[in-house]
Amino acid sequence: MNTVEKWGLFEVSLKGPSAGNPFTEQSVSATFRSKNEIVTVDGFYDGDGVYKVRFMPSFTGDYVYETVGSFPEAESAGDFTVTEPTGNNHGPVRIANTYHFAYEDTTPYYSVGTTCYAWAHQPEEVHKQTLEELDKGYFNKMRFCVFPKHYIHNFRDPETFPYEGTPVDNSNLTEENFSYSVDFSGNNWDFTRFNPEHFRRMERCIVELQERGIEADIIVMHPYDRWGFSVMNREQDDLYWNYVIARFSAYRNVWWSLANEYDLMRAKKLEDWEHYADLLCKKDPYNHMRSIHNCIPFYDHTRPWITHCSLQRQDLYRHVEYTTDYRTRYQKPIVWDEIAYEGNIDMGWGNISGQELTRRFWEASMRGGYAGHGETFMNPEDILWWSHGGKLHGESPARIRFLHEILTQTPGLGLKQGTGAFDETVAVPDEMIPVTGYEIHYYGFGRPSFRNFVKPAGENWRVEIIDTWNMTITDVGVHSGKFRIALPGHEYMAVRLTRV
Amino acid sequence: MNTVEKWGLFEVSLKGPSAGNPFTEQSVSATFRSKNEIVTVDGFYDGDGVYKVRFMPSFTGDYVYETVGSFPEAESAGDFTVTEPTGNNHGPVRIANTYHFAYEDTTPYYSVGTTCYAWAHQPEEVHKQTLEELDKGYFNKMRFCVFPKHYIHNFRDPETFPYEGTPVDNSNLTEENFSYSVDFSGNNWDFTRFNPEHFRRMERCIVELQERGIEADIIVMHPYDRWGFSVMNREQDDLYWNYVIARFSAYRNVWWSLANEYDLMRAKKLEDWEHYADLLCKKDPYNHMRSIHNCIPFYDHTRPWITHCSLQRQDLYRHVEYTTDYRTRYQKPIVWDEIAYEGNIDMGWGNISGQELTRRFWEASMRGGYAGHGETFMNPEDILWWSHGGKLHGESPARIRFLHEILTQTPGLGLKQGTGAFDETVAVPDEMIPVTGYEIHYYGFGRPSFRNFVKPAGENWRVEIIDTWNMTITDVGVHSGKFRIALPGHEYMAVRLTRV
């Protein structure tokens, strides 16, 4: 008998017609039933006369299914058994306690993300290097695009295209003549015929991330385009969205980012985004995380379909320090997916130091928000992590992993900003019934030689000095009453107090 | 015949009664006349039966004067000749072009300040060290207090007190028992009898600064007090203000700061500050610079008596970056007198790096504002520049002097923020009739490896790379059209473009 893990992917494969245009002329769907759920999902055409329907079971036990469709062979039925999850399978990530995340099995998920927009479209060697870096456990979420990316440092054609057809000639593209206004006329695509190989590449990436405990934050649309994928009409967009949803939804680690920098997509209006969101809400039976990422104006993250705020910093100088304000405003998790990248390219969104990026991670995290990494070092082969993946060259990833270790030690699902002095960010557990006895005092760019603490009489507190840059935790003993903790007088220090 | 330089200090000394209380029972004033001005000023009692009247002439040529007063010897007359100013005597600083400063002789004054609150009250050895540091030309304005300072690191009694009497015992003061709420009852002062020696110490400081081309930004009141000087009644305050004005006004380098952190002086209300301002406007015939410095809420700097905004940063993260906003709001020069100090004390207002303080100076200055330095390194003898003066230990002073050299090369009276990309601060000359052909592009914490520039056809621009931290200016030649300037990919760089 067939078995699949709970939150695993169960796939039904059907032979069917390959004549005509199966993408538009044929359809297939399936209903999956068990004691606890009945789920109907659309299938998709995967080329070569093969149709597939995918399903992610949310319960253990026996399931039956029936498939139906527009062609005779689409009618089928079967059953399978869903077993307990194993390994790092904790299920999809869900919202927890308003501002935080937990996997469906209740394991807390403290998000530390990265971005490799176009890593799914790179040659094998770069792809392998990316995986080697991801193996180091720096990150547990990655943002990346379905569509290829057209931008400076991104003039090579992708390994595959999402549609049948031929791309515009890229041989004369240079950074000099790069423009945000593109003439799409050199392209010749059939927007009604997908290239399944392109989507299988995406799925390989999703699975590779899943194996490494990394959420796949899939950017479905984006503005950096020379092929016309950003200016398709409503019918073409719907075909695309339905195809993406049918293919990717059953992967438990999928998050939906409707767009990167939605506000730069001139051809799309508010009603378009709300329409795609509506499609997602109707067609994704698992309610994966949903958000939409800004360049400058935030989308209205109060909208009910948005599960969390995927933010790019708006101001050059103050951004993650608004985390508490935005928590209050949006009543959702605050995920700073773009807060400038470690690197040295010409542009200010990609040339901050590892120290500064790490500081931003801490300032966000200590306020009960979450942050995202990216890396943009000039590279002789023009391979920049932010877009291609490849090798990491910066200093922040190891510090981000260290921060994540600290976050996993949080009592409860996440942190929030507690009461503190004007010159520190104090993190305390973010629980409805206040959890006392755990505090992290973070000093950022301050360089105190010591700090004084006052605790109620009769309490004993273990004190640890955390050097967030040198990645050390030094136990300096148990203290009570009023006490002074000596610090090294350099930047990026924190003090953790735990009542014992 | 007596002579004095224009903007020099002419003093008339008179013998008079020492019996009773000359400070309250006697008065003296003088009227100074020349072809161009008639000025009447109050004199003051300087102890030992000596009364003085001081005057700063604003014109060259012949002057006559008459003194009058409450005692027979107060009646006198005389004349003197005012000669051209010499050396670094450029006259008092005036507002220039709304947002900037120039000396009265029209020499531009680009303010780079520092703070040594209590340097006037220190022993000779520390005083000498302070002067040795000031000789290095790092700063051209210093903020300091008339009253002594009571605060952590400041428990020693001052060398002199402003009044006759005896101070509260300080032998049991510790950082542990320091409190912002003070019991003043251990003091025994006669608030009607000044100690002239205390004020002569102040005047020595004013002159020492003047000799070094440094403006004396005198803080007349402040909240850090264990002696009761901050809670005198209106009559006592008026006596004090009149005495201060009579003694100090004739020094050309005097600026008036009504208070440091006025909002922490619980005994004073808005009507008090407006009353002191009114006194100043009436009694200081020279209209020295006038402002009032906040801890948290800004004073309403739109008030007409305020010549410039003396600001302390309100937010920990974004502050000098609001310079352009505040210029617009207040239509006056923006002087960031407190933006955290270089150091390593426990508190966040005194433990930023030299790099960060220098960055703040640049961000303020490139927007057409001005910034102030301070230094608070832990010191075994508890001598911290911010309060005592003494020796400087930080890295920012040399960089501030370097910035000042750059500022003196400005075509015109000052800079303003010009049009630039989101990730740079562009400074251009701030002139009514736009002056083109001079731009400084500052990148702050950004680390670009290069920047592209585009200039109109037919123009040639000299390009200099300014390393604001390593204090180098590298000429990289004349460029035109679209050109790329290679940069070292580290922080704190600027590019200066000058049309040739």
Image (cartoon, coloured by chain):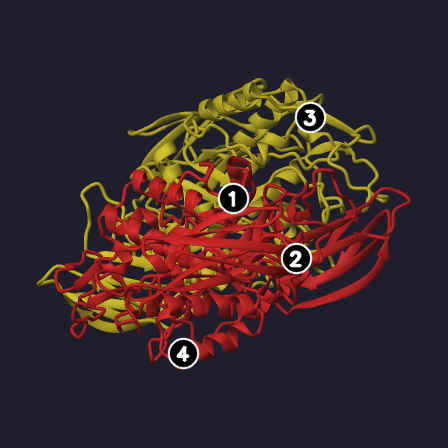
Chain colours: A red, B yellow
Identify the residue at horizontal 65%, vertical 30% (top origin): B49
Q: Please give the chain letter of the residue carrying mark 3.
A: B
Label 2: element kind: helix
* Residue labelled with disc 3: B231
Residue B98 lies in quadrant: top left
Confirm or deny contact between disc 3 and disc 2 (CB under 8 A): no
Which of the chains bears the disc numbered 1? A
Three-letter residue code for mark 2 = Leu
Same chain letter for marks 2 and 1: yes
Name the amino acid, label 3.
Val
Neighbours of disc 2 within 10 Å: few (<14), some (14-19), many (20+): many
- Badge 1 marks a residue whose secondary structure is helix
Residue located beneath label 1 in the image: A322
| Disc 2 from disc 4: Cα separation | 31 Å
Work out how far the residue at label 1 is from the one at label 4, CA to CA, in angstroms: 36 Å
* Amino acid type for the residue under numbered disc 1: Tyr
Percent position (x, y) of residue A70?
32, 53
Left or right: where does residue B227 sit relative to residue B433?
A: right
Tag on residue B345? Answer: none
Nearest to viewer (mark 3 / mark 2): 2
In the shown orientation, is residue B211 left or right of residue B352?
Answer: left
- Is residue B499 positioned above or below A453 on the image? below
Frontmost residue, B135 versus A252: A252
Rendered location of residue A356, percent (x, y) = 51, 61
- Rendered residue at 50%/70% (across/down): A208
Tell if the residue under mark 1 belongs to the same chain as the one under mark 4: yes
Mark 4 residue element:
helix
> In the rendered image, which residue does mark 2 sit on?
A407
Chain letter, disc 2 residue: A
How busy is the neighbourhood of tag 1: few (under 14 within 10 Å), some, or many (20 plus)? some
